Amino acid sequence: MTDPVSEFYRRHLPEAQQRNGTLHAPCPFCSRPDKQPGGILAVHLNPDSFFHGYFRCLNHCTPGGFPLHFARLSAIGLAEAPGFDPDRDYFGRETDYPVTNLNQELVGFADKLTGDALDFFQRASVAPEILAELRVGYNGRYLVYPYIQANGNCYAARCVHPERPGDFFWHGDERFAAEPFRLFNVPEIEHCENGALFLVEGEHNLLPLKQLGLPGIAVPAASDLEHLDPQRLCWIRTIFLWVNHTAESEAMARSFATRTGYKVRIVRWPEQAVRNSSIYQLAVVSGPQFQRQVFTLIKQARSFSPFATPAGEFQGFRERLRQESGDSYANLTSGFAKMDQALAGIHGINIMGGTPKAGKSAFFIQIASDMALRKIPVLYYDFENGRQKIYLRTLSRLSRLAIDRIKTGGVLTADEQKRLTQAEHTLRAMLSWLRVINDRRLSPETMRRHIDFIRHETNSDYTVVVIDSLHKLPFKDISQQRSGIDGWLRQLEAIRDELGAAFLVISELERGAEGQFDHQPHLGSFKGSGDIGYSADNAMVFLTLWDPFADTTPAHRRNELWLVASREQSPGRVASYRLDYPYWGFAEED
């Protein structure tokens, strides 16, 4: 291997021999006067591994680490070590540590670690050498976990009952039992600079990993992750985060990973793992199989990435393609043949502008109710007409009875009564698929919940959302209307992409300098938002071809629908629509 890390170790361990990706050499640190000589230094060399360059003495004469730690131990100029950065600042070096410490007390605690207390660790196959390296002790009733600081001294220790983890107390300087210092085996952070490190919940859960030769630190409980500043681990390249198999711990792990970013890889428990499992329990139960299980889980650990895995991304693409090839997607149509041909169905964000009283609401109510009749779930967000008017107009169109005939309760002919009764039954059935919402405190989060609910309720893959109208969606202040509308458009884009929802949105048109509306439809006709052209998959204008001041019967009124901008379709005139007076609907014409 010719990479800088491998060359660095070969240069400073001239007697080393490599076997199966591991460099073995006489340990240069065991020859020191206070160490037992004859140890072997093992260096893991595999550029594809997260632990490439990690060394450790098999005699446990000194804690292991990566090249910069090796250079410090060997008194080699740090500039010679791969990855050295002279401008780095290290957490803890600016702390003013007191003169008084617990170092001598730790010696007495270590001497008491015998009998049942030592058996507690041996159940998980943790050797005394590991306990000595981390200076773990016993005070006669509680296991003592010393919290060594960056300067190598201990000022506080956590004393935990071996059989009851919830029974604990802090011993020593209470300042160093506070949240910023609740990190067990802190020196390991600097030892693993530019490399990988385990972060686990509970000191006793770290020890079986240390027995396997893996570097790591621990927080007393998963809740302490909330107070762990990610900057403390800023020079660690990869963090393997492994907490207990509980819902609370796993939620804390995800929260920490979100704050810390891509470098965190969460170790996930196997599906068959018992709830409340811990690393210590896994070591006790697994025995000789523990090592194999740990390294299998390491391989499966995924980075807490903002991106889906390539396999998941491809699977999502295939699933979406399968849905879009099915009948549910093809059935997302308005019921107006020429409109469906021009738009290729109701998909994405479709925004339609029109002059006041042009019939925009009636047009979309007709489309929404027709889709609901075909068992397509529709959410109709209404800020214009009110729920009662929408139902009444729908009933009028279905029964072919004018609203005044329905409301007066006058004598109906037998045929009219039959049509009304049938229309009422149809409307009642339709309301399982058409939900009208008048909530003026609507938020994007509420809209997402509504979509999830109706999709689950109707067992449907798709939902159509009608908004009447864009300019009356709730936002904080009327002075913020422009930014509020653009913000809502961003949210609609996100909901379209995340949930596959289709939108029909009514917009207002901009008046000209003389208070008139443009007779020639174009994208600039829309009021109050320059983002409509960017957000809309299809932008349409519903033009009136009748004079509101002329003395003509409403039955002769006609509108034209124009497609003025589209991502995938050709703009142009769609069709003419005759008002189906007095039944609150439209008929599409050539």
Image (spheres, helix red, strand yellow):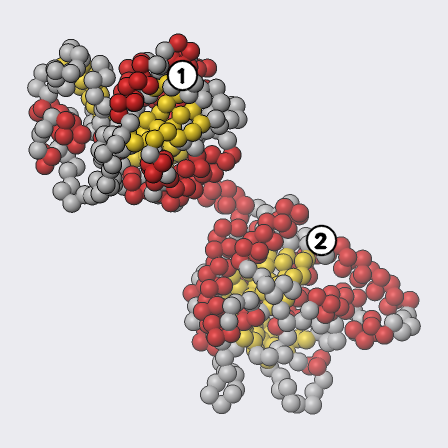
Could you tell me if residue 295 is visible in this image? no
Q: Nearer the viewer, residue 277 or 167?
A: 167
Q: Position of residue 32 (x, y in %)?
A: 12, 17
Residue at x-position 45% and y-position 69%: 483
Q: Place residue 291 in its image quadrant.
A: top left
Relative to residue 372, is residue 319 drawn left or right?
left
With respect to residue 484, does 496 lie above or below?
above
Question: How would you rate the neighbour count of disc 1 (Cα within 10 Å): few for under 14, some for 14-19, many for 20 or more?
Answer: few
Residue at x-position 30% and y-position 31%: 155
Label 2: which secondary element:
loop
Q: Position of residue 410 (x, y in %)?
A: 89, 74
Disc 2 or 1, which lies upstream in sequence? 1
Are the residues at dot 2 and dot 1 in contact (C-beta closer than 8 Å)?
Answer: no
In the rendered image, the quadrant that contains the N terminus is top left
With respect to residue 350, does 268 lie above or below?
above
Q: Nearer the viewer, residue 140 or 441?
A: 140
Q: Amino acid at mark 1?
A: Gly
Q: Which residue is mark 2?
A: 432
Q: Place residue 106 in its image quadrant.
A: top left
Q: Amino acid at mark 2?
A: Ser
Q: Place residue 332 in its image quadrant.
A: bottom right
Could you tell me if residue 9 is visible in this image? yes
- From the image, state whether disc 2 or disc 1 is nearer to you: 1
Relative to residue 548, is residue 311 drawn left or right?
left
Q: Nearer the viewer, residue 245 or 1?
A: 245
In the rendered image, the quadrant that contains the C terminus is bottom right
Q: Which residue is mark 1?
A: 140
Q: Which residue occupies the extreme front position in the image?
A: 100
Question: How would you rate the neighbour count of disc 2 (Cα within 10 Å): few for under 14, some for 14-19, many for 20 or more?
Answer: some
